Image (tube, rainbow, N blue to C red):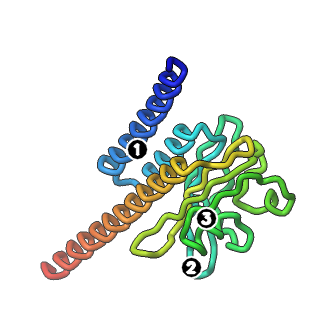
């Protein structure tokens, strides 16, 4: 009974940390308007909650069919790649974009996979869980969680990454909405100036 209660206590502590992380990300959504800050918060908290090696958010451009790394969080020696567009055929994240579902790679050990553009070479990673970021029924990006060791994710971990990806979708939708509002206000100001003239 004592061992069972200790195990249960540890599970509850993990759940409490996960809930706290979701709360932090949710508060960031409310308090911050800058998209980059929001995406950085999501990748940082994803890495913290899973204890993973690297977390990243890639955004998808349908025309041309490319992916771009918008936010990375990794250890101190990790050097994030330059923000450039990669052909979707050269990326691991394409599977989540195409299917619109969570995709898991429990063992990233083949040379072909490790040569893909969005799989970090240093520090090495062994497993990945990818969650699509969906806005208005369209996959606009992917939240990726890379593990240092081969790992099969359980259903709770998958649901948690899905929830973080949904928060990312809300952040992106809000940022786009605010950008449209600011553009509209700017246009109104210009029209008022022209009318005055």
Q: Residue at x 59, y 44 (%)?
A: 73
Q: Residue at x 46, y 52 (%)?
A: 164
Closer to the N terminus: mark 2 or mark 3? 2
Apparent side of residue 113 relative to residue 166 in the rendered image (left or right): right
Residues at discs 1 and 3 in contact (Cβ within 8 Å): no
Q: Write down the residue under mark 1.
A: 22
Q: CA distance from mark 1 to mark 2?
A: 29 Å
Mark 2 Cα shell of 10 Å, populated few (<14), some (14-19), many (≥20): few
Q: Residue at x 52, y 39 (%)?
A: 49
Q: Write down the residue under mark 3.
A: 68
Looking at the picture, how far across and down is residue 181, in whole percent?
A: 27, 68
Looking at the picture, how far across and down is residue 128, in whole percent?
A: 67, 53
Closer to the N terminus: mark 1 or mark 3? 1
Mark 1 Cα shell of 10 Å, populated few (<14), some (14-19), many (≥20): many
Closer to the N terminus: mark 1 or mark 2? 1
The local secondary structure at tag 2 comes to loop
Occupied quadrant, residue 96? bottom right
Q: Nearer the viewer, residue 48 or 105?
A: 105
Apparent side of residue 84 relative to residue 48 in the rendered image (left or right): right
């Amino acid at each position: 009974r004592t061992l069972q209660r200790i195990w249960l206590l540890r599970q509850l502590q993990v759940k409490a940390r996960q809930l706290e992380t979701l709360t932090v990300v949710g508060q960031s959504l409310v308090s911050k308007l800058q998209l980059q800050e929001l995406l950085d918060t999501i990748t940082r908290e994803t890495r913290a909650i899973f204890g993973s090696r690297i977390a990243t958010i890639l955004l998808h451009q349908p025309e041309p069919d490319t992916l771009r790394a918008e936010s990375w969080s990794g250890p101190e020696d990790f050097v994030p790649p330059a923000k450039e567009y990669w052909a979707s055929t050269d990326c691991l994240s394409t599977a989540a974009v195409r299917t619109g579902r969570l995709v898991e790679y429990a063992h990233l050990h083949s040379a072909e996979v490790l040569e893909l553009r969005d799989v970090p070479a240093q520090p090495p990673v062994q497993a990945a869980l990818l969650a699509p970021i969906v806005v208005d029924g369209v996959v606009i990006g992917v939240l990726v969680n890379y593990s240092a060791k081969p790992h099969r994710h359980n259903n709770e971990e998958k649901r948690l990454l899905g929830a973080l990806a949904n928060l990312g979708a809300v952040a992106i939708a809000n940022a786009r909405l605010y950008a449209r509002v600011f553009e509209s206000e700017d246009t109104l100001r210009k029209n008022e100036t022209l009318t005055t003239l």
